[in-house]
Amino acid sequence: MLTATLKPKACAFCKSAFMPVRPMQRVCSPTCARRTVEADKKAEKAQIKARKRDLETVPQLIKEAQHEFNAYRRLADKIAGHPCISCGRPLNWGTEGGSHQVDCGHYRSTGSASHLRFDEDNAHAQCVNCNRYGAGRAVDYRLGLIARIGLERVERLEAANDVVKWDRDTLRQIKTIYRAKLRDLKKERS
């Protein structure tokens, strides 16, 4: 029978020297073994998260960024006490955390002017009736917009016809920025 002589090793976790009991032993104690397994699991989770992040499509990221942006714009208008941008009626915000009757309406739609989908001058709180069932009520929206931000900025929106190809990094930044702005607004309110 062949027996191997074991030599002192450095622990894979704490790096202290120890005398192994088994040939494949990597750590000095059960505590270091548990911590090594936890570190390996954490590293694996981070790796999976990175792989999932790489698989996100541009349309998925646009949807997520749009969700954060719209939530921010609605809350900003709610805090400012603005009425519906189109009809001028007070907005029905519903109960806290419940369903709302307020949309984030865009003056120039995200379909026709996708480069303006994240422009704060282009998006405002709008009642569901005007936005969904009134086709945005563009003429009334324009009048409300002129009253709120001025003719010069409205004309800037109308003249903007840039072509933007959204990339993943930009959309992630937009999502992060508006999530932080939303969080800050919520902190201010409370």
Image: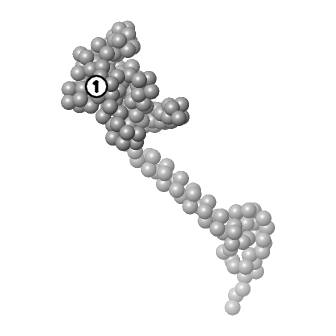
In front of the other: 11 or 3: 11
Q: Quadrant of residue 137?
A: top left
Compared to residue 167, the image places residue 46 above or below, namely below
Query: Where residue 29 sits: x, y (%)?
Result: 72, 72
Residue, x 39% and y 19% (percent of image)?
121
Amino acid under label 1? Ser
Compared to residue 71, the image places residue 154 above or below, namely above
Residue, x 30% and y 19% (percent of image)?
88
182 sits to left or right of 144: right
Q: Is residue 177 visible?
A: no
Query: Where residue 183 sits: x, y (%)?
Result: 51, 36
Q: Quadrant of residue 73?
A: top left
In front of the other: 157 or 11: 157
Residue ID for mark 1: 109
Query: Where residue 189 sits: x, y (%)?
Result: 51, 32
Q: Is residue 43 visible?
A: yes
Query: Where residue 26 sits: x, y (%)?
Result: 68, 70
161 sits to left or right of 137: right
Compared to residue 159, the image places residue 182 above or below, namely below
